Amino acid sequence: MGKSVEMTAGDTPPGDPTASLRRAVHQREGEPFADGAQPAVVDPTNSPGEDQPALVLEHATKSFGAVRALVDGDITLHWGETHGLVGENGAGKSTLVKVLAGVHQPESGRLVVNGREVTLDGPAASRAVGIAVIHQEASVFPDLSVAENVFIGREPLRRGRRIDFKTMNEQIAVIVERLGVRLDPRRIARGLSVADQQIMEITKAVSLNASIIVMDEPTASLSAHEVNRLFEMIETLRREGKAVLFISHRLQEVFDLCQRVTVMRDGRHVFTRPLAGLVADDLVQAMVGREVVDRAGAGGQRIGDVVLAVEHLSREGVFTDVSFTVHAGEIVVLAGLVGAGRSEVARAIFGIDHRDAGRVSVNGRPLRSGSPTDAIAAGIGFVPEDRRQQGLVMAMAIDRNIALASYDHLKRSGLIWGALERRFATDWAGRLLLKYGRLSGNASTLSGGNQQKLVLAKWLGRHPSLLIVDEPTRGIDVATKAEVHRLLEALAAEEAVAVLMISSELPEVLRMGDRTLVMREGRLVAEFSHSEVSEEHIVAAATGQTAAAGDLVTTDAMGHDTP
């Protein structure tokens, strides 16, 4: 398919059939670019070279020590196509994406971009051939502004080679307006929510005007409105002739957005087919190679005494007068839109953030404000939303991450015994069916689903009486999601652990919650039992809609009807 060309930063993709589009997309009609150039007007149906694929990766392999992450990686993208890529965590999707990004160089196989075989020696070379990658976990420089993060390494310059911040801010303002989201380009990135970090990464990719766009779980932390706006933008890119690779564990999104799909399993290509005529079960069976049995439903377990009592919890500007309880053996789900204050309530309960007013007690023991040490001593475990930044030490070994919260139990005469640490980690890795090469390997070598299991293992090793899990299945595959659901159910039903779960996925909320509490704009606005909850009730409460009489049962957090 052509002579091999080694691409480096500064090269342009030869014969790019959408080269003239790369500047026009996302620019307002008739508006010149910052350098004064006029956007081109192109008919994508008449693009040269449209008869050949945009990108072909064939028989790629990649290993990390004893772990064969990619055994036979194959993907073909066409111009004007949104192509889905699905598979379990550990199937090789992320490795394949990093090969396309130039982060990893495959040990064998070949990559062809627009008819020319290329070797990508780094991320800059990938960008040079027109590939932009939005990774599942955002890469953020926390002390730089949003604009500086988006334009890092390619800042526009004024006279005297000074950075043109005005141009950067203006270009980002245009992009986020088109995405339909709010993101201040002058804001310092430290403290951005996961959703805002993802939006920033999407903005960065859009600003590159790439002809091949790879999106690895871009919707994992977006609200329904933001997802819809993103889908509109992706559809615009597709109509303009771009090739989009869309990786998601939300199969419905793949069916809604994509024309073809590729399934991977155990590092190998399973099949590539048009989505027309396929159903979700076809993809699931191809992904896991077996039947997946999910949780039948909640609401039938016997619950015990109150473990967590939250009374009139408030933090100025974040949440107000939040009160609820969680009992032993009960799973309580906090539902609501992104930004409703759910994660912030969880952080205040665990003591990461200070509360301005209110009381938190565990098994009748009051907890000090702003003291995670006190919360851990009281028997609370906390699995945060951002597992990489807040839940794990990515550069630390797997066994040490598992033991991290339990060293007080692994000491002998004031010393930590390595043999006890390894035995402890091996036990919990086995219980949670963790897939890894070596326990001494870094946590960064694990797939997203196994990283989530690693965080769970760290806290379950302490045998908590209350486990707080924030978006526990974000960015993990259907089989691992079912495993996490079964694990949480078993903790509640068999070990009488109280579970407080935060989830933005309505099917998960309906399936897992013995009770569902809905937050809106920092307040608890509704509570539903498992038997009465529905998607319509949750959406109505979360958005402030007025439901028909009798359709929405609204109660306060302690179970009393409100007028």
Image: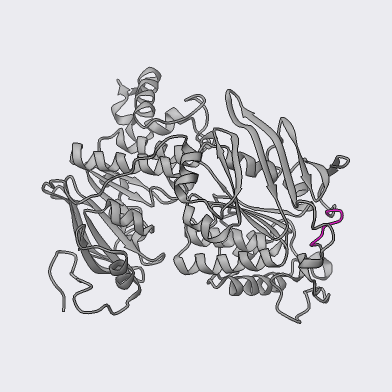
Taking 235 as reference, is 268 above or below it?
above
Magenta stretch, overall SS = loop
Left or right position of 225 against 557? right
Taking 346 as reference, is 418 above or below it?
above
Q: Quadrant of residue 452?
A: top left
Q: Quarter of the image for the N terminus: give it.
A: top right
Taking 434 as reference, is 508 above or below it?
below
State the residue at coordinates (34%, 40%): 293
In depth, the one of 105 and 162 nearer the eye is 105
Where in the figure is residue 239, as x and y percent of width and height? 68, 67
Q: Quadrant of residue 112?
A: top right
Left or right position of 215 against 425? right
State the residue at coordinates (50%, 58%): 253
Left or right position of 308 against 245? left
Can residue 189 be seen in the rendering of this structure?
no
What residue span does the magenta drawing correspond to? 13-18
In depth, the one of 546 and 101 nearer the eye is 546
Where in the figure is residue 344, as x and y percent of width and height? 35, 60
In depth, the one of 355 and 4 nearer the eye is 4
Where in the figure is residue 191, as x and y percent of width and height? 48, 59
Q: Is residue 450 magenta?
A: no
